[in-house]
Structures are given as C-alpha cells and as structure tokens.
C-alpha cells in the first residue's frame, strides 16, 4: 500500500502516498506496558558495591498518549517555528537580515554584547569530474557589539548550520575598530569603491536615521552608526558593497590629519551660526596663498569624495503637464498664483499690502475699505 514503482516515482505518483510510520520511534528498552528494571541492560549492574536486582517499576498512565503524539508529529512533519516580525529579517522565507547570536568563545575570550546578522545565504553549485554537480551553502555575515567593533566573514559547508557557524566564528576573529563622530555617525563624507561597486557616504545630523542599502543598515547596527546616507552606484553585488563600505570606514581621517595633508586651515561654516567661519583644525606648517595652485581642490566635500560627483537622475515633468486641460488651468490660476503666500509676506514685512515700489508709485497704494455710512444703516 505504501509503495510505488520506480517509473511511477519519477512521474511524481509517490507524492500522495501515506508516510510510513516508524513504530520504534519513542520506544525505550526496558520501558513498555509493564516497565522493568534490567541490571546490565537499562541500568548498571552494580550500584557502588551492591548488586542491583531485577524489579518491576510503576506504570506511566500517560505513556500511550505521548507515543501517539510523537508518532503523529513524525507523520505530519515538524512545524515551522513562527517568528515575530522583528526577528524574521528582510523576508519571512529567507535567512537574510536575521540575527543568529554572538560568535563562539575562543578559550577564555567571550563575545559578550555581540550580535551577528546574516547578510547573504545561498546555495552554490560546482560541477566536478567524479562526483557530478556538488552543492553546498555559502553564508556571508557581519558581527559587532554596536560600539565601534565589527567584522564580516564568509563560510561554506554542505549544511546550512555549519556554514553559518563557520562564517560567524570567522567574523569574530576578524574584528576591526571603526571610529565614529559623537558615537552616532561617520567622521566625514567619503567615496569608496570595490570592484565595480561605488559608494558615496554622507555624514548626517542626529536623528536623520539610516538611509542606505539594507545590508549596509545591518553593518551600521553592528558598528553603532545611527545616522548616515549612502548612495550606491554600479554593481549591487552584496559582498562587494560590504567590502567597499568597510574599506571606506577604515580609510577615514580625522580633521587634523586632513589639515596636515593639505597644509591649510580647515574651516567650518554652519547656518545655525550665521555661516560664521570657525577654524576646526590647523596644521603645523601652513602654505602661503602663492604656494596654492589655482587648479587645486579647496572644497572639503569635493576633496573627500576624490573629485567624484554623485549621479543625480533627471526629474521628468508629470504626464499631465502635456495635456491641454493643464494649460487651461494655468491660465485660469495665473491671477491667483501664490496670492496667499505673497499677502502674508507683505503683511509681515510692511504691516499692510504694500511693496518696495509703494513709495515710488503712491497711486498704486491699496485703498482701505470704505466704512458703512449712517444713512445706509438706517435705510437697511
């Protein structure tokens, strides 16, 4: 009843067959309907110097129910554990974005406070001459303590759990320290590249958040970066993105190092300070204006980006601007365009509906509304 021919199995006829029940599942030697104690089989023959005798044990009334439950779960298959939305990563099906705990301790060194994120988990195939198509799992992870220490690692193994464990432990052995600005963002803007992947990383103010690729977001959480903006151009190979990001982070320089490189003062302009120039760093030797060539890059953002510019896609006008009905609307709204905004600005600046031309052309002054006369009130 539970068999099918090989030809039928190849055509998929074995899918609907009932699964074979393993009646030995859950059975323990010496424990049955009448449980017995067998010295040398279920328990050691000697307890100290005393010889253990064969004896009858008390009957478990729930034994049959437990066996039936165990066999039923084996027949239907194990149920998938339901994860909460915060634990299931980027998608509910794949491992990408999930947390798998800290790396294993190495001797007396433990990874307290560390967490590991799975960035990529895929099956890779390799065609061999004697074994045919050989497949194994490749896992790419990043680990960190959220306080500047982080590392990434790649692990490959026939089983998924082994690959994850290998990658996690490799990441723990390759930790690097990443300096941060006020413990929330990068030290400065920078451009970085690995392969054909280009990243433009921008330092952001507190409360901005992580506006970047989801893999870079996981890396930022591992490092402890809370505010950043990253524009990715070129190849979106995930391993290249992570390697490029870490290369850029490790190549960051302090303001003093940048000032010493250029041999010029580093000056900051902030709108909240009224764009008043403030010297952040000064080198030990300062070049004179004659020594600075005219073609040298003096803009800080352009210098840290290496002269590169972020590709800004052209914004096309909406489709309805080409319709004749839109042109008719513009003609009708021409008189009232920005009327409310203009009225408020004039009232705030001049205290009335005047402009800077009112003194030159007094005849264009807006007349006040006429007050209702007494005759009009009596007639009403």
Image (cartoon, rainbow, N blue to C red):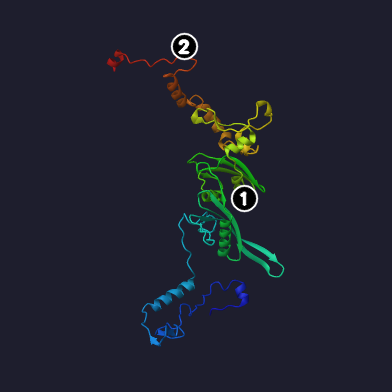
Is residue 339 in view? yes
In the rendered image, the quadrant that contains the C terminus is top left
Q: Position of residue 271 (x, y in %)?
A: 51, 30
Q: Which numbered marker is on residue 243?
A: 1
Give the label, 2 or 1, closer to the camera. Answer: 1
Asked if residue 231 is positioned above or below residue 104 in the image, the reply reads: above
Front one among 153 and 324: 153
Which of the two residues, 248 or 266, is positioned nearer the viewer here?
266
Left or right of 235 in this view: 359? left
Mark 2 residue element = helix
User: Residue at 56% of width from left, 61% of height from top?
Assistant: 164
> Is residue 293 left or right of 35 when viewed as pictured?
right
Mark nearer the N terminus (2 vs 1): 1
* Residue drawn at point x = 44 percent, y = 24 percent: 344
Is residue 356 placed above or below 306 in the rendered structure? above
Q: Which residue is mark 2?
A: 363
The x, y position of residue 235, in whole percent, is: 64, 48
Q: Position of residue 216 (x, y in %)?
A: 56, 49
């Amino acid at each position: 009843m539970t068999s099918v021919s090989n030809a039928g199995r190849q055509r998929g006829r074995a899918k609907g067959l009932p699964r074979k029940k393993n009646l030995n599942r859950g059975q323990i030697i010496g424990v049955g309907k009448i449980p017995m104690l067998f010295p040398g089989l279920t328990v050691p023959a000697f307890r100290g110097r005393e010889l253990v005798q064969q004896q009858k044990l008390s009957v478990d009334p729930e034994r049959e129910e437990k066996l039936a439950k165990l066999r039923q779960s084996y027949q239907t298959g194990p149920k998938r554990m339901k994860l909460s939305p915060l634990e299931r990563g980027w998608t509910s099906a794949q491992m990408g974005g999930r947390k798998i705990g800290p790396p294993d301790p190495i001797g007396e060194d433990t990874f307290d406070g560390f967490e590991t994120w799975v960035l990529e988990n895929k099956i890779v195939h390799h065609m061999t001459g004697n074994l045919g198509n050989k497949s194994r799992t490749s896992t790419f992870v990043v680990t960190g303590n959220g306080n500047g220490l982080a590392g990434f690692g790649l692990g490959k193994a026939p089983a998924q759990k082994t690959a994850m464990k290998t990658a996690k432990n490799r990441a723990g052995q390759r930790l690097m320290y990443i300096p941060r600005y006020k413990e929330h963002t990068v030290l400065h803007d920078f451009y970085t590249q690995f392969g054909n992947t280009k990243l433009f990383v921008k330092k952001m103010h507190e409360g901005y958040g992580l506006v970047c690729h989801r893999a870079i977001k996981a890396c930022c959480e591992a490092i402890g970066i809370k505010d950043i903006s990253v524009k990715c151009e070129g190849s979106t190979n995930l391993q290249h993105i992570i390697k490029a990001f870490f290369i850029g982070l490790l190549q960051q320089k302090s303001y003093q190092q940048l000032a010493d490189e250029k041999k010029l003062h580093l000056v900051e302009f902030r709108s909240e300070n009224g764009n008043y120039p403030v010297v952040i760093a000064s080198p030990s030797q300062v070049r004179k204006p004659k020594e600075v060539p005219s073609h040298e890059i003096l803009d800080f953002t352009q210098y840290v980006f290496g002269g590169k510019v972020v590709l800004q896609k052209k914004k096309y006008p909406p489709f309805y601007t080409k319709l004749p009905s839109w042109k008719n609307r513009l003609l009708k709204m021409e008189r009232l365009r920005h009327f409310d905004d203009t009225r408020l600005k004039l009232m705030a600046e001049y205290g009335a509906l005047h402009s800077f031309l009112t003194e030159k052309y007094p005849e264009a002054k807006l007349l006040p509304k006429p007050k209702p006369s007494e005759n009009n009130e009596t007639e009403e």
